[in-house]
Amino acid sequence: MFEFGDLRFRPVEREDLKLLHEWENDFEVIMYSRGKPINFVSMGQLEKQYEEWMKDEKEIHLIIERVDLKEAIGIARIEKSDFGNVRNAEVGTYIGKKELWGKGSGKQITVALLEICFNQLNMERCEAWSVEYNHRAHKALEACGFKKGGAMRQVEFVNGRKWDGFHFDILRDEYLAIRMDLLKQVLGNRLEEYIKKHCTIAGH
């Protein structure tokens, strides 16, 4: 498990599939997380996906829990790859508990994923994709240092019109330059506890 402030990241277990089934069949959740709201998933399909996740060493799937609420609030994914000899991670997440939308959890989750990627997995860059209308996600990514690198035009069709897909990325050195400021923002008085518990990046 990886603890970050009031969040806990742990592997997806088979007993989580019932909750994932609920989230993956929520029109609004999937509209913002995938840009494909009519993408309903049966329990059988989820069980098959879960078996594939267990075999795939390049992808990490994590349940996100709020420690204070003592319940799961969302899911995150880290997909490791190489561009030539550059270690790369694509990150993605969504908050399944919609009552937490717009309350800062997205930013905290994003910083936690950057900590995992850069401070634990030794990645050199991270990237993320988001559909054009998902302004909350764009704001969270940019607040964490991601830069919008480009767009794939009209790749999603949702609610009667076509939308672009936006690409964001952040390099290791760019993250290191703002790391402590971001950690202070999202961890507050828990920062010292976090720094003591986890290995810090040399010189920062």
Image: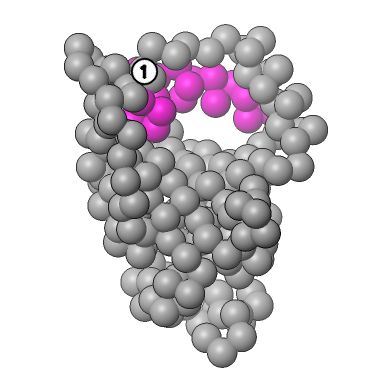
Residue farthest bottom in this picture: 203
The amino acid type of the residue labelled 1 equals Pro
* In magenta stretch: residue 20: yes
Give above or below for 159 relative to 14.
above
Q: Position of residue 136 (x, y in %)?
A: 26, 44
Single out the residue that lies furthest toward the right. Answer: 55
Q: Residues within 10 Å of mark 1 (few under 14, many from 20)?
A: some
Measured as percent of width and height from the top left, residue 114 is found at 51, 61
- Asked whether residue 88 is drawn in magenta, I would say no
Q: Secondary structure at mark 1?
A: loop
- From where the camera sits, is residue 42 visible? yes
Instruction: From the top left corner, tell me how far across and down residue 97 is, in percent.
Output: 39, 35
> Which one is in front, 169 or 75?
169
Considering depth in this image, is 138 or 171 the residue closer to the camera? 171
Span shown in magenta: 14-35
Q: Residue at the spot x=66%, y=37% of the render?
A: 12
Give the colour scheme shown: one colour
> Which corner quadrant holds the N terminus?
bottom right
Disc 1 target residue: 37
In-image side of 147 versus 171 (left or right): left
Q: Residue at x 70, y 43 (%)?
A: 58
Say above or below: 182 vs 7: below
Within the image, what quadrant is residue 119 found in?
bottom right
Q: Is residue 184 visible?
A: no
Residue found 57% across the figure and 10% down from its top:
42
Kindly report the secondary structure that dominates the magenta region of the rendered protein: helix
Question: Which of the 4 image quadrants contains residue 63?
Answer: top right
At horizontal 31% and vertical 52% (from top left) the residue drawn is 148
Figure quadrant of residue 118: bottom right
Closer to us: 72 or 126: 126
Residue 54, image x, y percentages: 77, 33
